[in-house]
Image (cartoon, rainbow, N blue to C red):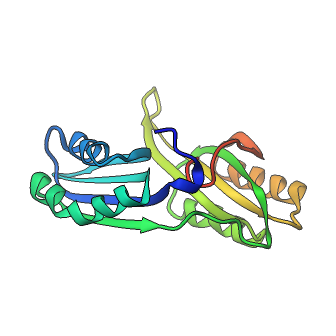
Amino acid sequence: MTTATSEVQHAALWFIGPDMPGLLRLGAKFVADRGGNIDKDIADKFGEKAVVFMSITAKPADIKRMEQDKDALKTASGCGVVFQPMKQPTVPEEFQGTLHGFDIVTDDSPGLVAEITGLLADFGVLIVGHTGERRIVPGPRTQVQAGQKYVVMLPHDFDHLGFTRGIDALAKRHNGTLKSPLRAVPGLLWWW
């Protein structure tokens, strides 16, 4: 879909329920059949349940049709379905318009995400997106690592050096490193 930004609307689609082959396809087909684009999706499995999230853009009339037809997806998938139309994302007045991001890889530990987000809050940073994954690294000594990616908005008055020192110290305390230091990232505000 090559529609101008002003002609599209955003929406979020979640469905949660029993996992089955073709579940992600059902969601993708539901969106495509109604004229939408999937800008970002996340699918995960928890025991016998699946969780799927899709960030969608489409013409306002198509978004309205998806909202009206969401019960068809509920029936076809056997999952609970939530469809939420959204407004165009905006940049709050007190923040810079450019998105920034960083990646960190550390040993996993309880409270790690709370510690990182606490540091971001201390520096007045607004989190736009976060993904994290815990993985077990095999070897002579099994290691559990946490990989995390943050996309943020910085306040106009931002201590870049102080933040870099703080996040670097935090990574080292958890036997880790900044995989990618804080830097401007290209892309749309809605999808990163």
Q: Residue furthest top?
A: 140
Quarter holding residue 176 = top right
> Residue 2, position in %: x, y?
51, 38
**The one of 154 and 59 positioned closer to us in this rendering:** 59
Q: Residue at x 78, y 73 (%)?
A: 93
Q: Residue at x 47, y 67 (%)?
A: 86
Q: Residue at x 69, y 46 (%)?
A: 102
Task: Answer with left or right where residue 128 lies relative to residue 167.
Answer: left
**The one of 173 and 146 positioned closer to us in this rendering:** 146
Quarter holding residue 25 = top left
> Residue 172, position in %: x, y?
71, 48
**The one of 142 and 100 positioned closer to us in this rendering:** 100
All told, the count of numbered labels is 0
Q: Residue at x 69, y 50 (%)?
A: 171
Task: Answer with left or right where residue 50 lies relative to residue 142.
Answer: left
> Residue 53, position in %: x, y?
36, 54
**The one of 121 and 42 positioned closer to us in this rendering:** 42
> Residue 91, position in %: x, y?
70, 65
Quarter holding residue 116 = bottom right
